[in-house]
Image (cartoon, coloured by chain):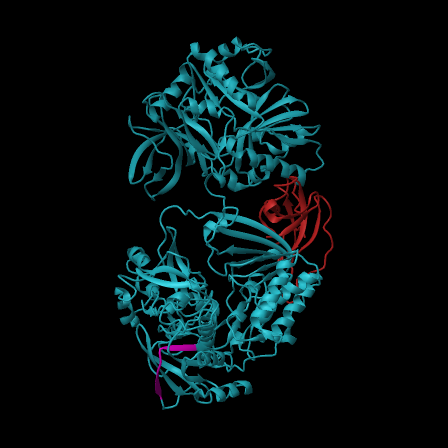
Chain colours: A cyan, B red
C-alpha cells in the first residue's frame, strides 16, 4: 500500500511510503509514514477538527505547517510521558504515540463548552475584569481558573533526561534554509568555525516545501550538494531539530533540542547555551492570514502550509480548494494543487492583476481568478462547506452587492509573508513596519548580528543566496555588521502585495484575528472605543498575541485592524516587543541536570557519619544537614529535645557546630581593619582574649554576630553565624579590596578546615582535664571569653571558652578530618559524666532560655543595635565603624522603634508561638511580634523573645498577643530567663 | 549573558561574576550631615549610557575590579583595577537614544 489515509495523494512528497507508523488520536487508531509530522498524518487521515478554541470552544483544524501553529496544540504521550500543548506541526510521528485534544469535554467532536460560542456576545474582551467584581474577584477565581488556561499538566515526575550543553563558535547560523546554507557554506570556506542550527529534521527550509529551481538546479540537488559540503567541512557543526529560542546580551543564544530520541550521552532533550562571535539569522518568514467573517473554520489554512502538506508530505488538504490572497506568492498553491490533480475552484485576489509570469501560469492552467475580490464569509461546522466572495471597492473599505457562494472543502489564505524578526528583536534590534513591502523589517541592532533571506524580506531564491553568501563572508572576516538595513540591495521580489488584510465587515459575524486566544475584530473595536490604542495596551486588553503562539499569525493583523480603526498608518503604531522564548521551552530543559541534590548539594558536617549512626534526625539548616535531635528508642522528637536540654543543664552535652564561620585575619593592620568592621572595640583586645561582636551594614542594620579572638597582635580569628559564613567572608573582602585597600592584611576563610565540637555543661572542665594535652583548663588559667591553642588528646586544637547556652562551655576546633574520631573519644570518656549528643533544636532552646540573640531570627532588616539594647557598647566604641553614621540619624534613635524584649505568658500552661503579633486594642494594630518561642524544660513553661515598640520601657507590662484568631496575655520581661547573672557560664 | 574580561584571569562568562553596583562612590566621614550621608547610602547615577561599576570575579580569583559598561548596548568599554581612575570614554550610545546626563544635586555630588 502506498497510501495511508484518504487524503494522501498517489505520489510525491518526501516520505518513506514503505514504512508505516501507527498512532492513536482521541482513541482512534491511525496510520502514517516515516517522514510525517503529526499534523500531516492527521490531515492525511481526513481529521478536520483537532482542537476546541480557548474561549468559545469552536472546532478548529490544522492551520499551518510550522512553529506558528495556533490550533493544533495537542497532548502527546510517548513511552508513558505525556506532554501538553505539543505543536502537531513540528512533532514527528512516533510509533505508538497517543495523541489527545485539549480544551474539550467530553470530546473534541461533541464539546459541551460550545455553549460559550452561543453566548459570545456576553464575553467581550476584558469581560471578566468587568464582570467578576462583586463582592470581589476571589469569589469567582477558582471557577474561572479551572475553565481558563489551556492544556493539562502531566502528573508525576518528569522522567525525561535533560542535559545542558555549551557551544562556542565563530559564526552561528540560525536557520538552514537556502540563505542559511549559503551563509554557513561561505563562512566555512573562509575558515571560520561554524555552527548551523535548524528546527526541522531536514536542512533546506522552505525550499523543501516548494517546487523551485535554485541556481539552475532542482532545490533538492542544490541542498544535497550544500549539505554534503558542510558535512565534510572540518569546522562545521550542524544541529537539527533544534530550535533557537532565546537571544541575549553579548551574542549568547539558547536553543532547545526537540528530538525524541536518546543521544549517546543518555540525554533526550538538550538545552544549548551558545556563545557566538558573529550571528547570522536566517530565520525565514511566517505567512499571515486574511481577516474575514468565520475565518476560523476547520479547512482554512495558510496558503504556504497547504503547499507544504502537498509537496513535502503528499497530503491534499481538500478535494476542492479556493485560494484567497492579496499577493503573488499564494498562486504557487493554486498551481501546485492544480498540477497534482486537485480541483482549484477559484483564486480570490484582492488585486486587479498579478505579475506577468503568474498571469501566464493562470492562462496555461485555465484557473478561474476573481479579481478585486475577497472572501467575506464561510459556511460549515466541523468541515468547510463553502466560502462567500464579494467584490472590493477601490478604496478597499466597502464591498459590492454580488456576493457569490463557492462550494469547497479547503481554503488557502495569504496576506503575504512577514519576516521572523523575533530573535533579532530579542537581541536588542529595532524593527519597523515597511509600508511598501507591507511587512515588519529588521532595522538596526548593536549586537554582532546579520539577518538574511526571507527574515530580511529577501524572498527570492537568488536574493536569499546573495545575502546569505555576503553575510557568511563578512561574519567570517569579523567585520563589523552594518547596523541599518543590511542587504537592502538584495530585496528584489515584493510579491506585489496589496496591503488589504481585512475584508470590510458586512454583518455582525465575527472576524478572527487571534485564533488561539479567540480575539476578534470586535474585541479590537472595543479596545479602541475604550482608548486602549497603544499597541502594548491593545495587546494586554484584548490578549491578542499573548497566547503560547505569541501572536505569530495575529500580531500584524491586529496592527492592521487598529490602523483601520484609528486611521493611523501601521508604521506609526510601533510593534510589541519580542522576548524570549521564541517558542515555549520546558523548565526541565533549562534546569538540565541541576535538580534535587544536584541543584543544591547537601552539606554534611565532619562528624556526619557518627550522627547518622546514633539516631540523629537530620534537617536542613542553611544548606547543612544537621541533627535536629538524637532519638533514643521510641522517644518522640519533643521528648528528645527536652532530654537534651536537661542533659546540658544537669550534666554535659556535646554539640557539633562545625558550620560556624571561621575567618582568619592576619597582618599589621588586622586590628585596625576589624575595628572599622565591628560595632565593638577591637584594638583594645589582648592576645588570648575573646570578645562578642556585632556587624552592621552601612544602614546601621545588624547583619551578623559572633565572637572574635585575638591570637596575636597581628592575627585574629573571626567567628560568624553558620548561615552567614560565606557571605561575611565576601563582605570583609569587599571592604578590604574596595574601600580600604591600603590596609595591610590577608583574609582567609577556614570554616571547613576546622570542625567545631562544643562541650557545654558543668562537667565540661572535668572531662577536658582528663584528656592528655598542654592546655591548662583550670578556672583560674582559662576564664570565660578566653582563647587557647595547643595539643588535646593528641590533636592540634583551638579552644574558645564561650557559651551559647549559659553553661560552662568550650568550643573546640580540631582539623576537620579528625572530627569523628575526636567526637567518639569525647563521648566515650564523657560517658561516666552523663554526656549526651545535642541536636540543634535543643541548642536553640538553651540559648532562648538564656535570652541570647539569634541574628536573623530575632532581628530583621530594620533592627539596629540600639533596638537590641547595645547603646552603651556603641557609646564606648572609639572611632568610625561600618554603619555608625546611620545610628546617628534621629530615626535610628527613636524610642518608639521595635525593641528586643522577653515575653512570658501570664496564664500557666499557655504557650507563645513565633510569628504571633503583639497588638494594641485601640487602635487595633500590631506593635511587634514574637521572634522566637519555645517550651523551656528547665523552667517548665513557655518563653519567648520578640521585637516590641518601646519595648525597653515596657518591662513588666501585660500585653495582648494575637495568633491565628486567638489571643493571650503575656508579660514583657528582660530577655534573660535563666541564670541572668551568668554565674554558670563564668564559673 | 555578558562576557567580561577579568583583569587577573581573562575573558569569562557573566555567571562567574557578581555585580557590585556603582563604583567611585566616596565614603563620607562620620561628621557629614544627614543629606550627604543619605546621598552616599541611596543615590546612584543610574545612567542611560556609560556606567562605571564594580564587579567581583566571585567564581574565579575573588578579586574586585571596575568595569565601564554602556547600559544601552551592554557593551563593555573598559576594565580597570580597583582604585584606578575612571577612564575617559566617549559615548557609544547614539546621541538620539541618550538622555541628558543626570548629575547629583546635593553637596555629596560624586560625578
Residue A308 vs A753, above or below: the answer is below
For residue B109, above or below residue A791: below
- Residue found 50% across the figure and 25% down from its top: A657
Residue A984 is situated, as x and y percent measured from the top left of the image, at 46, 15
Residue A456 image point, x, y percent: 59, 71
Is A408 a magenta residue?
yes
Q: Where on the picture, by quarter, is residue A40?
A: bottom left
Pinpoint residue A169: horizontal percent, then vertical percent.
Answer: 64, 55
Specify start and end residues of the magenta stretch as a single range.
Answer: A403-412
Q: Nearer the viewer, residue A552 or A756?
A: A552
Asked whether A762 or A269 is in front, the reply is A269
Residue A276 position by quadrant? bottom right
Coordinates of residue A107 in the picture (x, y in percent): 28, 63
Left or right placement of residue A337 versus residue A52 in this view:
right
Is residue A290 shown to the viewer in this render?
no
Displayed quadrant of residue A938:
top left
Amino acid at each position: 500500500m502506498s497510501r495511508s489515509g484518504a487524503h494522501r495523494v498517489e505520489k510525491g512528497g518526501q516520505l518513506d511510503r514503505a514504512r508505516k507508523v501507527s498512532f492513536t488520536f482521541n482513541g482512534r487508531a491511525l496510520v502514517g509514514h516515516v517522514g510525517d509530522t503529526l499534523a500531516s498524518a492527521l490531515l492525511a487521515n481526513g481529521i478536520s477538527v483537532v482542537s476546541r478554541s480557548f474561549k468559545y470552544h469552536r472546532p478548529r483544524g490544522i492551520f499551518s505547517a510550522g512553529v506558528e501553529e495556533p490550533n493544533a496544540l495537542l497532548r502527546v504521550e510517548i513511552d508513558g510521558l505525556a506532554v501538553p500543548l505539543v505543536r502537531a506541526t513540528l512533532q514527528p510521528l512516533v510509533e505508538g504515540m497517543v495523541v489527545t485534544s485539549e480544551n474539550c469535554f467530553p470530546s473534541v467532536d461533541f464539546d459541551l463548552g460550545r455553549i460559550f460560542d452561543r453566548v459570545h456576545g456576553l464575553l467581550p474582551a476584558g469581560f471578566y475584569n468587568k464582570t467578576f467584581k462583586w463582592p470581589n474577584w476571589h469569589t469567582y477565581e477558582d471557577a474561572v481558573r479551572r475553565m481558563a488556561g489551556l492544556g493539562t499538566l502531566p502528573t508525576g515526575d518528569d522522567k525525561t533526561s535533560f542535559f545542558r550543553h555549551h557551544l562556542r563558535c565563530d559564526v552561528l547560523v540560525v536557520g538552514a534554509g537556502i540563505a542559511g546554507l549559503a551563509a554557513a557554506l561561505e563562512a566555512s570556506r573562509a575558515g571560520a568555525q561554524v555552527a548551523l542550527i535548524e528546527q526541522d529534521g531536514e536542512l533546506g527550509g522552505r525550499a523543501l516545501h516548494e517546487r523551485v529551481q535554485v541556481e539552475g538546479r532542482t532545490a533538492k540537488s542544490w541542498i544535497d550538494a550544500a549539505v554534503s559540503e558542510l558535512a565534510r567541512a572540518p569546522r562545521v557543526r550542524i544541529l537539527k531539530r533544534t530550535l533557537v529560542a532565546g537571544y541575549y546580551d553579548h551574542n549568547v543564544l539558547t536553543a532547545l533540542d526537540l528530538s525524541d530520541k536518546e543521544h549517546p550521552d543518555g540525554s533526550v532533550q538538550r538545552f544549548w547555551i551558545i556563545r557566538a562571535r558573529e550571528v547570522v539569522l536566517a530565520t525565514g518568514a511566517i505567512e499571515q492570514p486574511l481577516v474575514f467573517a468565520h475565518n476560523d473554520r476547520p479547512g482554512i489554512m495558510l496558503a504556504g502550509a497547504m503547499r507544504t502538506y502537498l509537496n513535502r508530505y503528499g497530503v491534499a488538504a481538500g478535494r476542492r480548494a479556493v485560494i484567497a490572497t492579496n499577493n503573488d506568492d499564494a498562486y504557487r498553491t493554486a498551481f501546485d494543487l492544480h498540477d497534482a490533480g486537485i480541483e482549484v475552484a477559484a483564486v480570490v485576489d484582492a488585486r486587479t492583476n498579478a505579475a506577468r509570469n503568474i498571469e501566464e501560469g493562470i492562462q496555461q492552467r485555465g484557473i478561474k481568478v476573481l479579481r478585486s475580490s475577497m472572501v467575506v464569509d464561510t459556511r460549515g461546522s466541523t468541515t468547510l462547506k463553502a466560502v462567500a466572495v464579494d467584490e472590493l471597492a477601490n478604496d478597499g473599505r466597502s464591498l459590492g452587492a454580488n456576493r457569490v457562494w463557492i462550494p469547497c472543502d479547503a481554503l488557502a489564505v495569504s496576506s503575504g509573508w512577514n519576516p521572523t524578526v523575533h530573535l533579532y528583536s530579542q537581541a536588542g534590534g529595532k524593527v519597523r513596519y515597511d509600508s511598501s513591502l507591507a511587512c515588519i523589517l529588521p532595522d538596526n541592532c548593536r549586537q554582532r548580528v546579520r539577518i538574511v533571506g526571507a527574515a530580511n524580506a529577501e524572498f527570492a531564491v537568488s536574493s536569499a543566496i546573495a545575502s546569505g553568501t555576503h553575510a557568511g563572508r563578512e561574519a567570517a572576516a569579523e567585520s563589523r555588521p552594518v547596523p541599518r538595513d543590511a542587504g537592502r540591495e538584495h530585496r528584489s521580489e515584493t510579491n506585489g502585495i496589496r496591503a488589504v488584510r481585512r475584508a470590510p465587515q458586512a454583518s455582525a459575524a465575527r472576524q478572527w484575528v487571534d485564533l488561539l486566544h479567540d480575539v476578534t475584530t470586535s474585541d479590537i473595536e472595543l479596545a479602541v472605543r475604550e482608548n486602549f490604542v497603544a499597541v502594548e495596551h491593545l495587546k494586554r486588553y484584548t490578549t491578542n498575541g499573548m497566547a503560547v503562539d505569541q501572536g505569530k499569525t495575529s500580531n500584524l493583523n491586529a496592527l492592521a485592524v487598529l490602523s483601520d480603526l484609528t486611521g493611523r498608518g501601521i508604521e506609526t503604531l510601533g510593534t510589541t516587543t519580542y522576548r524570549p522564548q521564541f517558542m515555549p521551552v520546558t523548565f526541565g530543559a533549562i534546569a538540565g541536570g541541576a535538580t534535587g541534590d544536584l541543584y543544591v548539594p547537601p552539606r554534611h558536617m565532619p562528624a556526619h557519619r557518627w550522627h547518622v549512626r546514633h539516631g540523629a534526625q537530620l534537617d536542613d539548616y542553611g544548606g547543612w544537614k544537621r541533627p535536629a535531635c538524637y532519638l533514643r528508642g521510641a522517644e518522640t522528637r519533643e521528648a528528645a529535645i527536652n532530654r537534651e536540654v536537661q542533659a546540658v543543664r544537669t550534666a554535659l552535652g556535646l554539640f557539633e557546630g562545625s558550620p560556624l564561620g571561621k575567618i582568619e585575619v592576619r597582618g599589621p593592620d588586622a586590628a585596625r581593619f576589624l575595628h572599622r568592621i565591628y560595632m565593638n572595640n577591637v584594638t583594645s583586645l589582648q592576645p588570648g582574649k575573646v570578645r562578642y561582636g556585632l556587624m552592621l551594614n552601612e544602614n546601621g542594620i545588624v547583619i551578623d554576630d559572633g565572637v572574635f579572638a585575638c591570637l596575636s597582635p597581628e592575627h585574629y580569628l573571626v567567628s560568624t553565624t553558620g548561615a552567614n559564613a560565606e557571605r561575611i567572608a565576601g563582605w570583609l573582602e569587599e571592604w578590604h579590596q574596595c574601600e580600604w585597600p591600603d590596609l595591610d592584611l590577608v583574609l582567609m576563610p577556614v570554616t571547613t578546615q576546622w570542625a567545631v565540637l562544643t562541650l557545654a555543661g558543668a562537667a565540661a572542665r572535668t572531662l577536658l582535664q582528663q584528656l592528655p594535652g598542654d592546655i591548662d583548663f583550670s578556672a583560674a588559667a582559662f576564664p570565660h571569653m578566653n582563647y587557647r591553642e595547643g595539643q588535646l588528646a593528641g590533636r592540634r586544637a583551638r579552644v574558645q571558652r564561650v557559651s551559647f547556652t549559659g553553661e560552662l562551655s568550650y568550643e573546640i576546633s580540631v582539623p576537620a578530618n579528625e572530627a569523628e574520631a575526636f567526637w567518639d573519644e569525647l563521648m566515650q570518656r564523657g560517658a561516666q559524666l552523663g554526656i549526651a549528643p545535642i541536636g540543634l533544636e535543643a541548642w536553640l532552646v538553651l540559648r532562648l532560655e538564656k535570652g541570647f540573640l539569634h541574628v536573623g531570627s530575632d532581628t530583621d532588616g530594620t533592627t539596629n543595635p540600639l533596638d537590641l539594647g547595645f547603646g552603651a557598647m556603641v557609646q564606648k566604641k572609639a572611632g568610625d565603624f561600618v554603619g555608625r553614621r546611620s545610628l546617628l540619624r534621629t530615626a535610628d534613635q527613636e524610642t518608639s522603634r521595635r525593641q528586643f524584649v522577653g515575653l512570658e505568658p501570664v496564664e500557666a500552661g499557655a504557650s507563645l508561638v513565633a510569628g504571633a503579633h503583639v497588638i494594641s486594642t485601640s487602635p487595633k494594630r500590631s506593635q511587634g511580634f514574637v521572634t522566637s518561642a519555645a517550651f523551656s524544660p528547665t523552667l517548665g513553661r513557655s518563653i519567648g523573645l520578640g521585637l516590641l515598640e518601646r519595648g525597653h520601657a515596657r518591662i513588666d507590662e501585660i500585653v495582648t498577643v494575637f495568633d491565628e484568631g486567638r489571643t493571650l496575655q503575656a508579660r514583657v520581661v528582660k530577655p534573660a530567663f535563666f541564670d541572668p547573672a551568668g554565674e554558670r557560664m563564668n564559673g | 549573558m555578558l562576557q567580561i574580561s577579568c583583569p587577573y584571569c581573562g575573558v569569562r562568562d557573566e555567571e562567574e561574576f557578581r555585580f557590585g553596583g556603582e563604583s567611585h562612590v566616596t565614603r563620607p566621614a562620620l561628621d557629614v550631615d544627614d543629606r550627604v550621608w543619605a546621598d552616599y547610602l541611596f543615590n546612584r547615577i543610574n545612567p542611560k549610557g556609560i556606567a562605571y561599576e564594580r564587579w567581583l570575579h566571585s567564581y574565579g580569583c575573588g578579586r574586585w575590579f571596575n568595569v565601564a559598561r554602556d547600559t544601552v548596548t551592554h557593551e563593555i568599554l573598559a576594565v580597570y583595577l580597583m582604585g584606578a581612575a575612571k577612564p575617559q570614554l566617549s559615548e557609544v550610545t547614539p546621541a538620539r537614544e541618550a538622555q541628558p546626563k543626570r548629575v547629583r544635586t546635593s553637596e555629596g555630588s560624586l560625578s
